[in-house]
Amino acid sequence: MSRWLAGCIVTILMAAGAAMADPAGVAKSHSDAFAAAFNACDVPAMLALYEDNAIVIWPGQGEVASGKTEIERMMKQQCAGAPKPELKLVSSDARALGKDYIVNVGMWDDTIPVPGGKPMTARVRTTEVLHRSNGKWRYVVDHASIGLPPPPPSKP
């Protein structure tokens, strides 16, 4: 009987580990899908990466949305403007928060074409919470910010 119980416990622990899989791989895959959809301005593909009740805070003034209707509106506004920015994932640090939750801290380069000049790139910092439901990972929280430039050197 105890051998059977031990076998059950090992099976449960293995299943729990397999269910979580690789937080870094999940977050990277999700980020890559977001970057591809964002860069193509594919709003339906971007929106599919979010839970119905997700919260989004992006760096621009007023770029705060709660729920898919508001998020969709914000995404469409982002895609309607010119010039179109291009996002590229620079780094990602993901950690499991439990069986079905991952927190990811990412660094992105957001490049905007500038008329008559070199493209301008800003480093965007993200903190994201992903949740797995119905077998799919989706953003529950997507918070992005751009740091302030360093202060000018002080004069002696």
Image: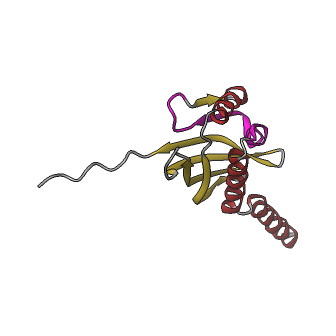
| Residue 128 drawn above or below residue 58 | below
**Which image quarter: residue 156?**
bottom left
Residue 7, can we see it?
yes
Residue 41 at what x, y percent from top left?
71, 41
Decide if residue 150 is on the left or right side of residue 121.
Answer: left
Where are the magenta residues, as a range? 42-62
Q: Does the magenta stretch include residue 60?
A: yes
**Which image quarter: residue 78?**
top right
| Residue 58 drawn above or below residue 126 | above
Residue 59 at what x, y percent from top left?
51, 38
Q: Does the magenta stretch include residue 100?
A: no
Residue at the location (50% across, 30% down)? Answer: 61
Residue at the location (61% across, 55% down)? Answer: 88
Q: Residue furthest front?
A: 116
Residue at the location (55% across, 54% down)? Answer: 109
Decide if residue 16 is on the left or right side of residue 58.
Answer: right
Foreground pick, 109 / 137: 109
Foreground pick, 63 / 94: 63
Quadrant of the snapshot with the N terminus: bottom right
Residue 26 at what x, y percent from top left?
71, 57
Foreground pick, 60 / 139: 60
| Residue 140 drawn above or below residue 92 | above
